[in-house]
Amino acid sequence: MTHNGTTARYACAPEVSFREGRPIHPSIHFEHGHRLALLELPRGRSLDLAALKALIVRSGVHHGIHRETLLAATLAADQDRSLVLADARLLHAPLRGHFAETLSERAVLTGERLGRFLLSTDGPLTLGAGLRFGVDGLVEATRRGQLSLAGGVAQVVMTVHERVLTQPVVQVADDGAAAWLDLAPGESVTAGALTDALVRARIGHGLDHHAADDATTATDAARRIVLAHATTVVFPGEAAVSHLIDDGPHLETLERIDFHELHRFPEVAAGTALVRVTLPTPGRDGCDVLGKVRRAPAPRPLDPARFIGDGAVLSPDDPTLVIAERTGAYQRLPTGKVTVVEAIAIAGDLDLHVGNLATRFPITIRGDVKGGFVLKSAANIEVNGVIEDARISVHGDLTVRGGILPGQQRVKARGAISARHVQDRELKCRDLMVNGPLLLARVHATGTVTAKSIIGGDIIAAGGIVCGDLGEVSGLRTIVQVGIDPWARAQLAQARAGLTADERLLPELKERCRITAHQIERLPPDDAQRPVLSTMLDQQLGDYATACQRHVARVELLADAKRLEEVDETRVANVTIAVSGTVFPGVEIRFGERYQLSVTSPLTRVTFRLAPSENASALRGIRW
């Protein structure tokens, strides 16, 4: 810690003060055996005088403080700074005073700390050869020998013969990075001879005055004293780009990432910051010990415009910021550009490269929707391939140019669904149009179902059914029902089930509120439990109010049940099932909830509708 060439650091906080060579907290850095104290300040940081004083006291700096540094430290700068806080060279030699501890003449080693030396003009001792005084007030031995306190001079006497060089030779590295002086045991130089040697070597930059002082004192060991250092070239800081929109996989736990949730197309509003480009910092020229300047390379620019894609622009207030020009779906392209689009196009499949997709914008998928994924849109969805066992939800229309394959996940659209074929799948939609077979499907349509053939399954279509063949020759059970709105019926069923649950839940929630209110009334006004119970009561009242609102909505829906039934009756009287091919045995035809017909023999080119009589109790088949 105290030997030549080593560095000691004192931090103002328990954390590490330096990270990768850069200060992260204001700290004090000692050099040259505590003869020099440097104040390290990160860029953008400053210290008020009170904090600076506390830091200096904690570090132990007592002498040689630069007042200019104290003033500079109170102002922030846009770069890291290393300010000379204190320098023992400011103290004029010889230094007089006395040791705080009692010392005796004894053998000492190089670098040994001898204690604190208190300066005073009338002190009994003068610091002599082999001892040096630090800005922290501690005295250190610079050589091995015998400590002598005779004659009012404290010094270290060596056993080797001392010799003063009159013609020292300063050597310079081939690349000009350093200049040094080699000294044998017992050798030293005078300040004048060293100055002449530096002039002969043409040293014009980077002189280390503390090292030069070390050369004027002999030691018992051979030394290489580096007298001058080149100023290192500081290369410019690289420009950096920061993508401000999170479009990566979400970390569920510390050990699990759900790669289905990649969030490739997060939605952003107009003006949202998308990309920030950090401009490169300029470099700093260097200089060798001979005074030859070494130029720093020019920084490599990074144009923010290279990241601008469709729907993105530069911010008018910040030329380094790319923002969204409009509201849309954000996407980062392989080229590095960012786009904000009002319609999402996926070039391949919806798979692990894309992840689950939920947006309010239209979606076009060039490939397939793979099983296990979720696809949702508040607009329309177009799939050029097939839909595997994936969950689909569309507020608009769903167009599948391939087919909808078997699976457990339902496919739902508030608009129309069109597909080449459908097999063993649950579908909910307004209208369904299938160019091929509708096989073993479970369909709830509020409009019309149109298919080339309907084979097996359970089809409910409020607006009627149009198909080629209905059923198949083996007699596979096929149920088709028209005239009723499956969505409204499902809502009524849920409302009835909810009313049954409300009969138990509402009294229970009300009783909880009553009990909590009673507990609050019994507590003293200053009891610590009152705020806790009051918060609990607010939450219980909120739950009760929400449950009451749901109950009222269910009651209103059920009160409208009669009107819905009348609408269904009117619809049933006018809806048809038109079959242009063959109706096979095993088909069960239902009109509403009351009228049904089981087909026992093949029928061709037939249309089914209710008989026009008001008291019709059977279906009538009309051939085309």
Image (cartoon, rainbow, N blue to C red):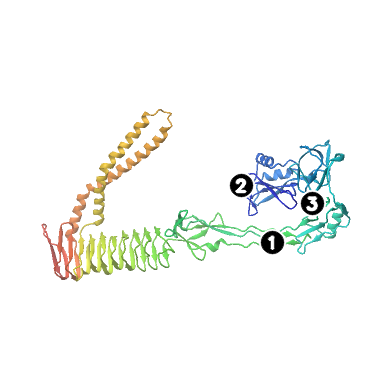
Q: What amino acid is at disc 3?
A: His
Residues 161 and 91: in front is: 161
Nearer to us of marks 1 and 2 is 2
Q: Count up the numbered dots.
A: 3
Real-space CA distance between mark 3 and mark 1, rounded to the nearest whole angstrom: 27 Å
Q: Mark 1: give few (<14), some (14-19) or many (20+) Cα within 10 Å.
A: some
Q: In the rendered view, does 159 fall on the left or right side of 347?
A: right
x and y percentages locating residue 318 in the rendered image: 56, 55
Real-space CA distance between mark 3 and mark 2, rounded to the nearest whole angstrom: 32 Å
Q: Which residue is mark 3?
A: 209
Q: Which residue is mark 1?
A: 296
Q: Mark 2: give few (<14), some (14-19) or many (20+) Cα within 10 Å.
A: few
Q: Which residue is mark 2?
A: 15
For the point 89% across and 55% down, the residue is 166
Q: What amino acid is at disc 1?
A: Ala
| Marked residue nearer the N-terminal end (3 or 2) | 2
Q: In the rendered view, does 307 fall on the left or right side of 23?
A: left
User: Which quarter of the rendered picture does the C terminus lie within?
Assistant: bottom left
Residues 20 and 301: in front is: 20
